[in-house]
Image (tube, rainbow, N blue to C red):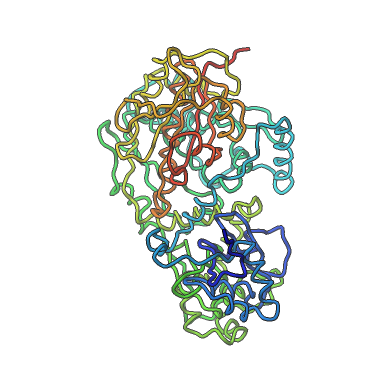
Amino acid sequence: MNVLSLSDRPVLRTAPGLVAVQARLFAPHVQGSGRWVLFDPTTRRSFAAVGKDVVPDVIRVLARAAGMGVFVHELDDLLGLDGAEQRERLCHAGLLVEARPPSSRVASGATSPPTFVSRYHEANFDYPFLDYSGTDWREKDRRIMAAYNWVQPPPANVVERPGPMISLPEVGDADLFAEGELEERGLATVLRYTFGPLEVLSGAFKDHLRKTSPSGGARHPTEGVVVLLRALRPTVLDAGHIAETLAILLARRQMATAVVPLPASDAADWVSEPEFALVVAAPGSRGVPGAAAASTIGGPGAFSDRRTVPPGRAEAMLTNPFAYVSFTESSGMAVEIPWPTPSRVDLGLGGFRILSHCQPSSRGDRDTTATGVLAAIPEAGPAELASLRTSGALLAAAQARSLYRQASPWCQHDWYLSLLAHAEVRGHAPKCLEALRLRVAAHRGETTAWAMLQRRTTRAFADRPIAWDTLCDLISVLALPARPTVRVLVSALAVDQRRPATFEVQSGSSEAVVVCDGPDRGAVQEICVGQLPAARGAAVIWLLGRVDPVDVARYETDLIELGRIGQRICLRATELGLGVFQSPAVVDRALQRTLPVGNARLFVTYAFTVGHPERG
């Protein structure tokens, strides 16, 4: 069989999904001669685009090769004397790939521009977590945490807030068991037992607070640092745990609740303290407040839009910290603006230089007024500059500096791509104000309140099976949504009167169908990145949340729904005397290879191991 070498490829094109992001935000600890970093979400590899006040050669090549691609001989001429060698390096790096026929791109849907959320979702597939199966995992984990602690100490458990204080009655555990209408004491109870600490736990780098949700509340947000690119996902799942806790406690006070996506405001702290959703409550046990009620709080008219620099003013401008460059079939390059208002503008080489010129300067020696920009970049015309200003790619300097400052903690911990995804979700949120119904499952009154107080993460399970009826009881509280957004697979490892097998719970019913034999405990541990507790229980509940990265506005709220179902598992398991170990850290390829999930790229997986906790 003949093997086609790189030099024999007739047509090459830019790798699909490739983006250029600002180097100062993506890699703030790296000093280099370029202002942009190329990031490939498929491989998670990044490359510096060398050159500050010019268009880097690699950007010129990628812009030329975007779309239908470029013939090899044309590319070699474009690269100059050592063109063949440079081309080989670009191919080996994966920045240039063999062009596919136009018909195959149409068939695969590749002609529609990807969202940044879709790129983020792709980069999370089969993420290379720390392998916890090794004997030295604890030391490796400590080194990672120590490195993050060196960059920046963990955030405070409690943040002091300016402004007038509203005193609420002091409440205790007895109030948690009370029911009735929502009055002052009831509100204090809901807030205290959703957000307040139950106890203080000692930790290596800081003390932690144990709360009713999520994960017992003990180690967050510190655990979020470890998973890096997936940091946004566990945080949003945690928000789902909290939303379910609020729904349960408010239901005991005769309040119905709903969750709606919340648009990012132009307030000064929306980046440093991101808003994931809005929980709306209203009196009544039937129905929930709908989009109309929610829109009065978080609707499109709730926040002013100061994204543009008026074209006639001699005001300094800076590049929007959320703006990034994509490579397109139509124009070669485009600048994508996820927030304040999502937009996409074709970008020429002059426009690229404008975005480079207007990035913040540590020396402050660049004139970023309209006059200064056009003088520094003669090939850029007033029309191109005006397009970047009105689209939001360029912001008023004061507003942009504020956003850069707020983004700094994200960037210091390598979370910039998570921030970009979150900004895009927030920018699209006004288009999705449909209320997501928080249907509270039939929890058993006082036992649910007791479970909130007792709930802990279990890391040691007893070596004995659980009853099949107990497992069915646990599954019955999931209250899966009618629309098939969540799949539930249950792997029985040690269940009385059942052989080891995996079955699927049917959406909208309590029926379960066996879908495969196994997996064994070794396979479960492999799927759960080597975490031993995940493989030591009696059963594993796999929640697979189907997400649509193109439907940007719902991406986070769909994950919140997954977290809400997870909180039901935790509370009902505690009521039944079972322990729970949960983790969103999953090796996607191992999951796809072991269980009949189909294409794991379509899901976010949340694993829950349940069993009898080991006493003593």
Please tell me which residue lies in front, 368 or 90: 90
**Where 66 falls versus 610 (above or below)?**
below
In this orientation, does residue 172 appear? Answer: no
**156 and 434: which one is in front?**
434
Q: Position of residue 81 (x, y in %)?
A: 70, 81
Q: Residue most toward the left?
A: 286
Residue 437 visible? The answer is yes
User: In x, y percent, where is residue 385?
Assistant: 51, 80
Position of the N terminus by quadrant: bottom right
Q: Nearer the viewer, residue 132 or 390?
A: 132
The quarter in which the C terminus is drawn is top right
Position of residue 597 relative to residue 498, above or below, is below
Give percent across and percent down for residue 459. Answer: 60, 24
Q: Quadrant of residue 528?
A: top right
365 left or right of 501?
right
Seen at 33% across and 36% down, the residue is 481
Residue 111's image quarter?
bottom left
**Residue 236: horizontal and vertical position, in percent?**
49, 42
Question: Which residue corresponds to the image point at 68% horizontal and 28% vertical from the top-left?
Answer: 202
Q: Is residue 42 left or right of residue 557?
A: right
Q: Nearer the viewer, residue 608 or 351?
A: 608
